[in-house]
Image (cartoon, helix red, strand yellow):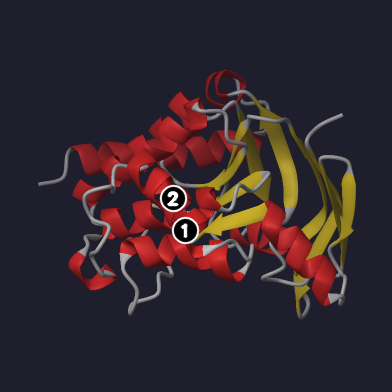
Amino acid sequence: MSLIEIRGLSKSFGKNVVLDNVDLDINEGEVVAIIGPSGTGKSTLLRSLNLLEKPEAGTVTIDGKTFDLTTKVSKEKLELRKQTEMVFQQFNLFKNRTALENVMEGLTVVKKEKKEDAKKQALFELERVGMGDRLGHYPRHLSGGQQQRVAIARALALKPKLLLMDEPTSALDPELVGEVLLTIKKIAKEGFTILLVTHEMDFVKSVANRIIFLENGKVVANGSPKEIFDNPTSDRLKTFLRNINMLQSADDYSI
């Protein structure tokens, strides 16, 4: 049995069907990247698993426990969110708290840990992402890449079964993207289970175990990086990859 089993996930905004009966399995320690055109439901899929969006239908089973994604029960929502931590595009750090305090916050408030224990765990996670020398810095004194690494440390500190990453580099200047991608690569090697939405195709090729191509709310292709990039079977996937390569080529030759 897979660590994560998503079944029948459906979500609409008015008449616009964004997720259409999505099924997806994720194994423990696997990095699964979701790619596809803009507006095709990639971020909504992640947000639905963390109940930041409320689907019309669907369940997720995590390590043998099944959650109804349409639940209205606060206790069940909290339990699910403890299992599925999100790393956002815009970092979402508390502006009036230091890097250390930002990571400690979830441990003391959500997990009710003692302050001493929370501080020890927060220090460990910040060291893990290379932010051990910025403990007392507030977000305004950190670069975008540093803020995102603090956000990753905050998510890791809560020890989720599934780490959700929604375009974690899209809000960064190009020169800062690399430091965040290296951090994600590091934690992937350490065995964290990750579901990632990104447009960084070279990174996907080097880090993901499996790639999901999502279009019009449906899983159109599901395979290894080699299968997806070297032998795409879907015409729509072929077109998507061709367009991505054209954009990459244009960037390479831009002045």
State the residue at coordinates (72%, 40%). Answer: 220
Helix, strand or loop at label 1? It is helix
> Is 35 located above or below residue 150 in the figure?
above
Q: Are marks 1 and 2 in contact (CB under 8 Å)?
A: yes
Q: Nearer the viewer, residue 14 or 177?
A: 177
What residue does disc 2 label?
Answer: 120
> Is 29 located above or below residue 150 in the figure?
above
Residue type, label 2: Lys
Disc tally is 2
Where residue 159 sits in the image (x, y, percent)?
60, 47
State the residue at coordinates (41%, 41%). Answer: 200
Q: Quadrant of residue 30?
A: top right
What residue does disc 1 label?
Answer: 116
State the residue at coordinates (81%, 32%). Answer: 2
Where residue 21 sits in the image (x, y, percent)?
85, 54
Q: Residues within 10 Å of mark 1 (few under 14, many from 20)?
A: few
- Left or right: residue 153 versus residue 216 is left
Helix, strand or loop at label 2? It is helix
Q: Quadrant of the N terminus?
A: top right
Residue 44 can be seen, yes or no: yes
